[in-house]
């Protein structure tokens, strides 16, 4: 089982490195060549794993009027996710000692 996971992880990391290199080489060509290389179905699939391309997509902002109208909803989503993460951390903090009573006994001795 672990061997399969390791092989899969190594293959995935190598594919991400290949995709980043592939898209990086294409990016330094002129615009027509870049569109030709990344415009095919295989090119779009490969560039979807490219780290620089995904970083560029994450940093970009949309000037779409619909997106601007929904900006407050994005803020609510952000704070909601922060609350979920904090609540899960708090639940783990309180449930951990109950599951391991010997740990609590050793801690109280100190």
Image (cartoon, rainbow, N blue to C red):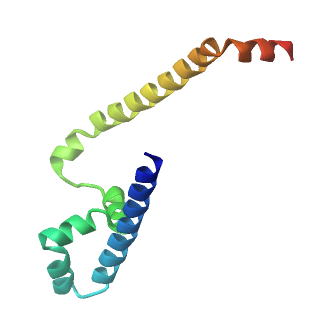
Front residue of this view, candidates 104 and 76: 104
Q: Residue furthest right?
A: 110
Q: Looking at the picture, how far across and down is residue 18, in whole percent?
A: 35, 73
The C terminus lies in quadrant: top right
Figure disc tally? 0
Front residue of this view, candidates 31 and 19: 19
94 in relation to 24, above or below: above
The N terminus lies in quadrant: top left
Q: Looking at the picture, how far across and down is residue 102, in whole percent?
A: 72, 14
20 in relation to 29, above or below: above
In which quadrant of the rendered view does residue 84 lie? top left
101 in relation to 30, above or below: above
**Is 26 on the left or on the right of 16, as rendered?**
left
Front residue of this view, candidates 51 and 61: 51
Q: Looking at the picture, how far across and down is residue 13, in whole percent?
A: 41, 63
In which quadrant of the rendered view does residue 75 lie? top left
Tell me what residue is drawn at x 40 percent, y 68 percent. 14
Tell me what residue is drawn at x 38 percent, y 35 percent. 78
**Is 65 on the left or on the right of 18, as rendered?**
left
Tell me what residue is drawn at x 52 percent, y 18 percent. 91
Front residue of this view, candidates 101 and 84: 101
Tell me what residue is drawn at x 43 percent, y 61 percent. 10
19 in relation to 92, above or below: below
In which quadrant of the rendered view does residue 100 lie? top right
Q: Looking at the picture, how far across and down is residue 83, in whole percent?
A: 44, 26
């Amino acid at each position: 089982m672990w061997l399969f996971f390791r092989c899969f992880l190594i293959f995935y990391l190598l594919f991400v490195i290949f995709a980043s290199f592939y898209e990086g080489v294409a990016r330094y060509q002129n615009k027509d060549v870049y569109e030709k290389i990344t415009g095919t179905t295989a090119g779009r699939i490969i560039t979807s794993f490219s780290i620089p391309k995904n970083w560029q997509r994450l940093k970009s902002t949309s000037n779409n009027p619909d997106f601007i109208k929904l900006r407050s909803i994005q803020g609510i989503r952000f704070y909601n996710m922060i609350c979920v993460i904090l609540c899960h951390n708090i639940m783990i903090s309180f449930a951990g000692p109950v599951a391991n009573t010997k740990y609590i006994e050793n801690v109280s001795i100190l």
